[in-house]
Amino acid sequence: MHDARRLLTKEQILTIPNAMSGARIVLIPFIIWTYAIDRHYLSVALVALSALSDMLDGFVARKLNMISDFGKFIDPVADKLTQAALLICLMTEHSHIYILFIILAVKEVGMLFWGALVFSRHDSVNSAKWYGKLCTVVFEGTMIILMVFPNVQESIVHGFIALCAGVMVFSLTMYSLFYLKILLTGGRKKDAN
């Protein structure tokens, strides 16, 4: 029988990389608040700090041998919450950004479905793949550009929306194929970063 409680043990949760992911979640209200009070430069600095933490937490986890199933869960949660916050901020200036919000919601519901299905059948939590990390880098990089240059032409904004949408659909497709392969072959695939 599969036991999700094993993800919530002290050893799983209390690690430096998980603290870094938690700090990224704590930063989210401050990103939104600084953007709302028209301190875009401060919002960008906080997003950059969050992105740096995101890059470092995986490195620290591997270097200090602190990779955990809880970390594999909380890290992408921090990513998705940050991405949703950035979209909420930017929707106030670029109305068509809502399209990315819808795609993000569909993508994450799909990812939740696949991840839960694999966990229920194989009791495994898989870490992020290169296509997921690529999606995060492109998405957050694009959002930072739009925050730094809020008055950019709408045609450029539409180009960024198309780029992000394409990368998000690509990532969901690749993850779907990855999880489908696990389900069809009946075993846990080695985590690869």
Image (cartoon, rainbow, N blue to C red):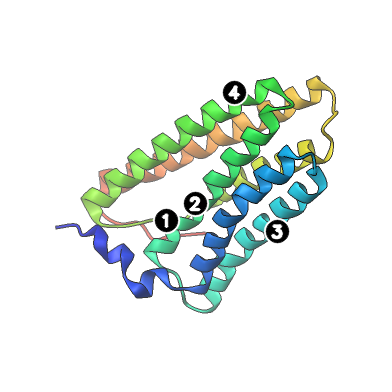
**Mark number displayed over residue 99:** 4
Tag 3 and tag 2, C-beta contact below 8 Å = no
* Residue highlighted by disc 1: 73
Q: Inspect this view and state whether residue 138 appears.
A: yes
Question: 131 or 79: which is nearer to us?
Answer: 79
The amino acid beneath tag 2 is Pro
Quarter holding residue 23:
bottom right
As measured in the structure, the alpha-carbon distance from the residue carrying label 3 to the one carrying label 4 is: 26 Å
**What numbered label is drawn on residue 49?**
3
Q: CA distance from mark 4 to mark 1?
A: 26 Å
**Which residue is at a point 21% across and 60% down the rendered structure image?**
3
Q: Position of residue 38 (x, y in %)?
A: 79, 39
Residue 76 tag number: 2
- Going by the numbered disc 3, the residue's amino acid type is Leu
> What residue is at 66 percent from the left and 43 percent from the top?
32
Say which amino acid is labelled 4: Ile
- Residue 87 sits in which quadrant? top right
Q: Are marks 2 and 4 in contact (CB under 8 Å)?
A: no
Marks 2 and 4, how far apart at CA: 21 Å
Dots 2 and 1: beta carbons under 8 Å?
A: yes
Q: Which label's residue is closer to the chain start, 2 or 4?
A: 2
174 vs 125: above or below: above
**Residue situated furthest left in the rendering:** 1
Q: Is 167 situated left or right of 123 in this image?
A: right
The reply to whether residue 129 is visible in this rendering is no
Q: Secondary structure at mark 4?
A: helix
Task: Tell whether 186 sits left or right of 173.
Answer: left
Q: Amino acid at mark 1?
A: Phe
Crowd band around label 2 with a 10 angstrom C-alpha radius: few (<14), some (14–19), many (20+):
some
- The numbered mark, 3 or 4, whose residue comes first in the sequence reads 3
